[in-house]
């Protein structure tokens, strides 16, 4: 099974990248490709820019990663209740390629933040919106209070939260 995973943030210390990486590596016998959004920085999408210059090669490269994956894990960072600009821009560009943003791939959507809601607002939005972008959201999980509930070497330290994540992960991988 080929898993594509990334944190939907361009922060060099992204807690969402940490969570996506951890969750992806919980899948046994999977080939995991981890992306860093900083490797896909492009001009802000506009129809005028697309007409003038076409679709950037970085968007094509990102889209190729989507095509090659069997399943996708994204941990969504929340900026003012929504997606980060870095992620939204990538999503806008790849949506212009063949009009099939996520290729009907199964998704495990995650979110986390230092706060008590754990990025729940962006996660709620994504669970609804991704279906319109040809994603099949099979599972989702929000980790609140990241710094209290996650350790880089141990993973999710709260037993109840870890159990919830594993239940969702098993749904995602089809167990």
Image (cartoon, rainbow, N blue to C red):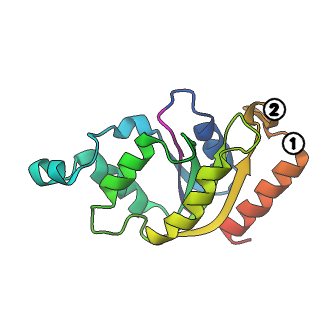
**Element type at mark 1:** loop
**Please, is residue 95 above or below residue 152 in the view?**
below
- Quadrant housing the N terminus: bottom right
Q: Nearer the viewer, residue 43 or 38?
A: 43
Residue 134 visible (yes or no): no
| Left or right of residue 2, residue 15 in this image | right
Q: Is residue 9 magenta?
A: yes
**Which residue is at the far front?**
80
Q: Residue at x 47, y 61 (%)?
A: 69
Question: What's the magenta region?
Answer: 6-10
Image quadrant assignment for residue 170? bottom right
**Which residue is at the far left?**
52
**Element type at mark 2:** helix
Residue 72 percent across, percent down from the top left = 54, 59
For the stretch drawn in magenta, the main secondary structure is: strand
Q: Residue at x 27, y 48 (%)?
A: 45
- Quadrant housing the C terminus: bottom right
Q: Residue at x 61, y 43 (%)?
A: 21
- Mark 2 and mark 1 lie on one chain; the one further toward the N terminus is 2
Residue 87 percent across, percent down from the top left = 44, 46
**Please, is residue 108 above or below residue 44 in the view?**
below
Q: Nearer the viewer, residue 121 or 99?
A: 121
Assess disc 2: are there few (<14), some (14-19) or many (≥20) residues with their C-alpha within 10 Å of its C-alpha: few
Q: Is residue 105 magenta?
A: no
Residue 142 percent across, percent down from the top left = 71, 50
Task: Report which residue position mark 2 lands on.
Answer: 148
Mark 2 and mark 1: span between their CA atoms?
9 Å
| Left or right of residue 102, residue 80 in this image | right
Task: Report which residue position mark 1 lands on.
Answer: 158
Kindly indicate whether the residue at mark 1 contacts the one at mark 2 (C-beta within 8 angstroms): yes
């Amino acid at each position: 099974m080929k898993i594509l995973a990334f944190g939907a943030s361009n922060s060099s210390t992204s807690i969402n990248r940490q969570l996506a990486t951890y969750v992806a590596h919980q899948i046994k016998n999977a080939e995991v490709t981890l992306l860093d959004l900083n490797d896909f920085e492009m001009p802000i999408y506009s129809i005028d820019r697309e007409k003038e210059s076409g679709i950037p090669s970085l968007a094509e490269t990102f889209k190729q990663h989507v095509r090659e994956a069997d399943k996708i894990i994204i941990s969504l960072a929340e900026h003012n209740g929504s997606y980060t600009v870095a992620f939204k821009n990538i999503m806008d560009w790849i949506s212009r390629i063949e009009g099939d943003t996520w290729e009907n791939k199964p998704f495990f959507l995650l979110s986390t933040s230092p706060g008590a809601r754990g990025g729940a607002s962006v996660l709620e939005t994504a669970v609804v919106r991704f279906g319109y972008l040809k994603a099949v959201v099979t599972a989702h999980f929000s980790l609140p209070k990241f710094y209290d509930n996650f350790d880089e070497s141990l993973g999710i330290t709260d037993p109840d939260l870890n159990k919830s994540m594993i239940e969702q992960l098993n749904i995602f991988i089809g167990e």
